Image (cartoon, rainbow, N blue to C red):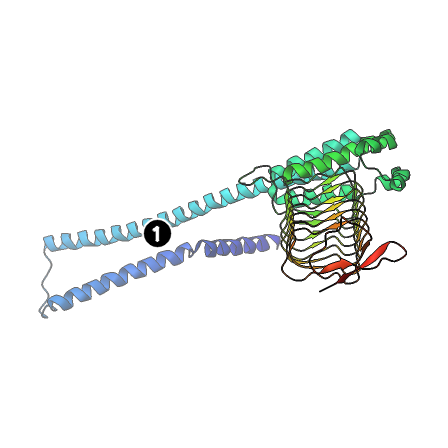
Amino acid sequence: MSNERESSAERLDTKRGYRALGLWPMWYALAACLLTAISLIVTAWLLFNWLIGSPPKASPKPLDITTQLELAKLAFATVAGLGALVALVTAYRKQRIDEAAQILARQMARDTTHDATERRITDLFSNSVEQLGHEQAAVRLGGLYSLERLAQDNPAHRDTVVSVMCAYLRMPFLTQNTPGVARRGVTYPLELLDALDRAGQQELQVRLTAQSILRTHLFYSGGSQPNYWPRIYLDLSGAELIHFELSECRVQIVNFEGARFIGGASFRKAEFTKIATFIGSDFQGVADFRGARLSHAANFDDSIFRGGADFTAATFSRMVTFNGVTFGNDAHFTKANFPDLVTFRSARFAAAAYFNEAAIQECRFQDSEFHGFAVFDSAQFSLRPDFAGVSASHPNEHHRWPDGWRTDSPGSDGMAPLVSWE
């Protein structure tokens, strides 16, 4: 019974193979060729007789030896022609089958190579991820470099590798190992080293290495660069980033929501081609965005810039919001370009705020506070700025407000409302 099922399955596979090659079974093909040949011969004979006229009927005469030999030759030629036709059909089918076999063999070889490559990549990826969870820092470093090599050699896996590195950086570090650092606030990595134990110092080196790998492959100076990884999405929301460096890098999407930047954070001349999110970020050192280009919407709402923020000559191509932001030190927006709406609702400028020579399409500063001095010299506004509910330190001779605005009588806290006098 099983042999019958196997034979039936083989016949079914054979039929499927014939259909895939576009071939009939052998007997069908031979029969079709013979019938076609006979039909052509009969048709040619009738057509020939019709063209020259059918010979008149006469009494049959016995065939002489010469005629018999000619007829025999004709019969042999016909048989030989039919044999040649069969041979031609057989050779054609064999050629088609051989070609299909070669194509199938190459496809199987490619599939085998692909499967072997994928297995090797999967094994390497699994081992590297497992190394990241090892208790020894040296093993974790090895895992990072293995992931880097895997992503460099296999572009299709770069997103996954970057996601793993970002997930590693999002895992708690200082909040668990050194809770005192979070309270004191660390400005420079060297101060952080002094506050960590040996295991913490080793983990710090692992994290700095992960950040360095990302920066290396996101660095973009134009043209063809084999080490650059395009169209990357960085999800570092809630991460603790130490002396973070993304200068002159090009990234598609970044998410730093709730991230804490310990030490300086440099985004100088960086380009974010799509959405950039910094909601609730905490910049403990200087945040350097000089010459940065944010091509789509950007959101800095509720962020804290403790060490100062420098957006000199930055370009915000779409809407950008700084609502509820605290600038604990000087905020520089000199020569910044805002071709769309920018909002600073309820923002707090604890020190100087420089907007001189900025190009601003539309801006709203409702309910913001300028505790230092504000400079808007030579700022260009396409639409009248909105300073409703804004208060500023008074008296302060260093203020340079846009035309049509001035401070009014100060209150007991030394802050005066900004009013329009036009």
Which residue type carries mark 1? Val
Q: Position of residue 390 (x, y in %)?
A: 79, 59
Q: In this view of the protein, can residue 290 be seen by the observer?
A: yes
In the rendered image, the quadrant that contains the C terminus is: bottom right
- Closer to the camera, 4 or 255? 255
- The residue carrying mark 1 is 89
Question: Left or right: 404 with respect to 43?
Answer: right
Depth check, front residue: 88 or 339: 339
Horizontal placement of 324 versus 338: left or right? right
User: Could you tell me which residue is drawn at 10 percent across and 61 percent down?
Assistant: 62
How busy is the neighbourhood of tag 1: few (under 14 within 10 Å), some, or many (20 plus)?
some
- Whole-percent x, y for residue 56 in the image: 9, 70
Q: Is residue 131 visible?
A: no
Q: Is residue 56 above or below residue 274?
A: below
Helix or strand or loop: what does disc 1 sit on? Answer: helix
- In the rendered image, residue 317, in percent from the top left (x then y), is placed at 62, 54
Figure quadrant of the N terminus: bottom right
Left or right: residue 341 compared with residue 29: right
Residue in the picture at 67% in, 53% down:
275
Residue 249 spot, x, y in % from top left: 64, 41
Choose between 411 and 155: the one closer to the eye: 411
Which quadrant holds residue 321?
bottom right
